[in-house]
Structure formats: C-alpha cells, structure tokens
Image (cartoon, rainbow, N blue to C red):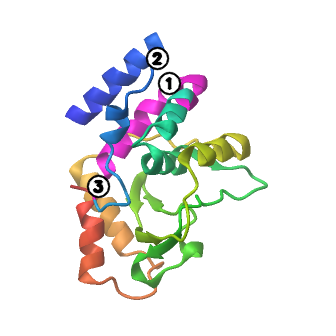
C-alpha cells in the first residue's frame, strides 16, 4: 500500500510539474533479472501510468527507459501496457535467450518474460543467456510506440486472495510441458509476496 501511495503521489507531481522522473522511482520496482521480481509494484506502476494522458504516460516510460536502473523494469511495463496491432505480432525484447520454467518455449508465452493471468503479470523466465549486448529499453520502447497499440487491459492492485487465485490458475496451466519442480513453484509463489 505504501508503494501505491508513493507512486501515485510521485506521478501526480510529475504530471503537474513535468519534472524529470527520478531514478529512485523506477529503481523501486523489483528487477526481474536478479531474482527479486514481485508483482504488486508493477501492478501499482502500470495502473498509475494508465491514469495519465497518453503523452504524459509515454514521457514517463521514456524517462524510465533512459534512467540508469530502468531498462529491465521498463521492458516489463512495455509488455503490460502495449499490445500488438491486429495485423502484426508483438515482438519480444532482444535481451537474450530465455530460460523458461516447466520445459516451455517461446510459443507458450507470447508476452515473454511475463504471463498475464487475470491481470496479474507473472514472470515465467528464470534467466536469460546472452552473448553480446541486450537491446536497450529505450529502443524497445521506440518499437512499442511505433508498432504497437496501447493495451486496453486496465491494471489494478490485487488482494492477497486474488493473487493466490491467479497463482493457482497459472500452476494448473496446461502450458507446462512437465510438472513444475519445487524450485519453479517456489519461484512463482515468491512473486505474490
């Protein structure tokens, strides 16, 4: 709840004053590449961004994408806030080869690195392998703005019961190619804490 209030206050002041987004705000989002990913802060941030007019929302995402700590975090927000146009695909970010849970593959997760379950963005990749440099978040955001539509899904904070229900739905998914291992179930369960 404190995160939600802080994010809303910050974004409200940003919208009114057009100040530069501080790195501390985007850095407060858990980084999905270092085992700290949690769902609630991303739901709060996505909901806050959706309350802004489109121009301000895109400027906010731009500042996140170009901040020192914003790259990985902005990619998650892009996957939540944009969608493919009817005649095209929503390409994945070029951040390395995904290592999926449950022996699944790219085709199983069109929003990789996340899967939306009842509006809850679960991380379904436990790591990436990269030889070279990842695509900067600013370039991925450029792609999203030019080639994608703004998503119509509206994000809201979820109760603990709603988060648990979404988790159980994901764990029971027929997408898994084999039963999830204990560490994989723990990886997913930790995201709702």
Point out which mark residue 152 bears. Answer: none
Q: Is residue 19 above or below residue 103?
A: above
First in residue order: circle 2 vs circle 1: 2
Quadrant where the image shows the C terminus: bottom left
Q: Is residue 182 above or below residue 53?
A: below
Question: What is the quadrant of residue 26 in the picture?
Answer: top left
Q: Is residue 111 above or below residue 13?
A: below
Answer whether labels 2 and 1 touch (C-beta < 8 Å): yes
In the picture, measured across the screen, residue 44 lies left or right of residue 155, that is left
Name the residue nearer the viewer: 66 or 148: 66
Point out which mark residue 15 bears. Answer: 2
Q: Which residue is mark 1?
A: 52
Outermost residue toward the bottom in this view = 178
Outermost residue toward the top in this view = 17
First in residue order: circle 3 vs circle 2: 2
Question: What is the quadrant of residue 188 in the picture?
Answer: bottom left
Indicate which label's residue lies in the foreground, 2 or 1: 2
- CA distance separating discs 3 and 2: 30 Å
Residue in the image at 48% along x and 15% along y: 18
Q: Which residue is mark 3?
A: 163
Name the residue nearer the viewer: 31 or 125: 31
- CA distance separating discs 3 and 1: 25 Å
Give the magenta-colored segment's residue range: 36-58
Quadrant where the image shows the N terminus: top left
């Amino acid at each position: 709840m404190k995160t939600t209030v802080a994010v809303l206050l910050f974004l409200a002041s940003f919208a009114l004053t057009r100040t530069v987004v501080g790195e501390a705000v985007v850095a407060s989002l858990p980084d999905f590449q270092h085992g700290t990913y949690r769902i609630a802060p991303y739901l709060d941030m996505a909901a806050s961004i959706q309350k802004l007019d489109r121009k301000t929302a895109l400027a906010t995402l731009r500042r996140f994408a170009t901040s020192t700590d914003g790259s990985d975090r902005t990619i998650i927000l892009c996957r939540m806030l944009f969608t493919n146009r009817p005649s095209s695909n929503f390409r994945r970010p070029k951040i390395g080869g995904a290592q999926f849970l449950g022996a699944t593959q790219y085709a199983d997760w069109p929003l990789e690195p996340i899967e939306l379950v009842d509006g809850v963005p679960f991380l379904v990749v436990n790591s990436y392998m990269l030889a070279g440099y990842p695509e900067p978040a600013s370039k991925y955001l450029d792609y999203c703005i030019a080639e994608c539509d703004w998503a119509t899904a509206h994000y809201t904070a979820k109760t603990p019961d709603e988060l648990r229900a979404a988790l159980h739905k994901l764990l029971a998914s027929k997408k898994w190619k084999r039963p999830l291992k204990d560490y994989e179930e723990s990886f997913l369960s930790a995201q709702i804490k």
